[in-house]
Image (cartoon, rainbow, N blue to C red):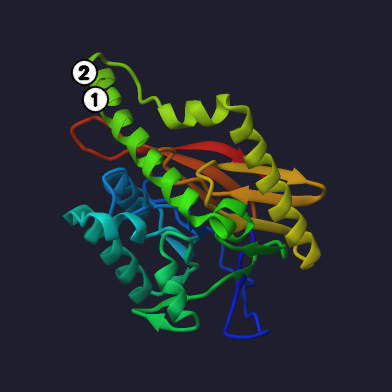
Amino acid sequence: MRTTFDALGPFIPVLGGPAPPEPQDAAHRRYRTVFISDLHLGTPGCQATALLDFLKTHPSDYLYLVGDIVDGWQLRQRWYWPQAHNDVVQKFLRSARKGCRITYVPGNHDEFARHFLGHRFGGIDVQDEAVHVAADGKQLWVIHGDCFDGIVQCARWLAYLGDNLYELTLKLNRHLNYLRGRLGLPYWSLSAYLKHKVKKALNYVTHFEVAVAQEARRRGHQGVVCGHIHRAEMREIDGILYCNDGDWVESRTALVEHYDGRLELVQWVPSHDSHGLGHRTQVEAV
C-alpha cells in the first residue's frame, strides 16, 4: 500500500526505504508495514479483542492508523470505553516505544485529532495524510478518504443520520449473530449484505474508489491506501493500485506489506478454542 505523510504545509515527508530481510517466524509473523482503519473505539461494535490479538501476533516496522480510530461522534452521544479499548491504545503506545513508526491519519469520526496535525503524542505522529514508499519503490498515498464523500462534506446532518442507522444495524447484527452462534452458524453481516444488494450503495462505493484513485494519479503516486467506506478492496483502477484496508467493526481486515514490497489484504478470524487466539486468512495479494 502507499502512504502519504502530510505536515503543516507543502512539505510532505516520505517514509519507507530499504529494510532488513523479513524474519521467518510462523507463530509471530512480522511485517514491514501494517495499515488499519475504522476501528471505531468507543462503540460496542468495535472488535477490540480481535484487533489486539492481531496486533500482538503481527508486529511491524511501520503502522498506519488510517482514520476513524476513535469514534468521537458516538462518544459525544454516549460514553462507552471498556478495558479492551484502552488495551488497544496502550498497545499502540508500547509499539511506538519499541521502535515501530506509527502515523495517525484522522478521519471524520475522529476529526477532533485534526487540531493536532504535525504533533507527536507518545511516539505517534498525527498527520492529515502521508506518503509511504514500499520496499519495491512504489509510492503509496495514505488518506482516510472522507474528503471524497459528498455526504460528509455537504450534508453532515445526513451523515450523522446514516451513522446512527448504521449503529442500529450493527446492534441488530450482534443479536442476530448471538443466535447464529448458539446454532453453530458462522458470523454473517447484515449491513454488508445490504451494502452489496442496494444499487445506490454499490454506485456510491464505485464512485468513491474511482475518485480516490484519480486523485492519487493526479498527485503522481502509484497507489493509494484509504478506509472510510468499511469495504476491504485491492484492485487496479486505470493503472493506480487502489487499496482499502476495511474495518474492525465487521470485516476485521488489514492491509500489510511484506519485506519484499508485496502487499496483501488479510482478514483476522477469531478462534473459539480454549487458547482464544485467531488466525490470519489472505483475502488478496499484489
Would you call the spot at circle 2 few (<14 residues within 10 Å), some (14-19), or many (20 or more)? few
**Residue 173 visible from this viewpoint:** yes
- Report whether 204 appears left or right of 157: right
| Badge 1: residue crowd in 10 Å (few <14, some 14–19, many ≥20) | some
Does residue 139 lie above or below 214 as drawn?
A: below
Q: Position of residue 235 (x, y in %)?
A: 70, 42
Looking at the image, is 242 positioned above or below residue 184? below
Q: Position of residue 20 (x, y in %)?
A: 56, 67
Residue located at (47% from left, 74% from top):
114
Q: Which residue is mark 2?
A: 182
Element carrying mark 2: helix
| Mark 1, residue position | 178
**Residue 42 appears at what percent x and percent y?**
28, 55
The amino acid type of the residue labelled 2 equals Arg
Q: Nearer the viewer, residue 94 or 81?
A: 81
Looking at the rendered structure, the kind of residue marked 1 is Tyr
**Element on which disc 1 rests:** helix
Q: Are marks 1 and 2 in contact (CB under 8 Å)?
A: yes
- Residue 21, quarter of the rendered image: bottom right
Residue 198, compared with residue 13, is above or below; it is above
Tell me if 83 is positioned left or right of 244 in this view.
Answer: left
Which residue is drawn at the image coordinates 28% and 18% (left, top)? 180
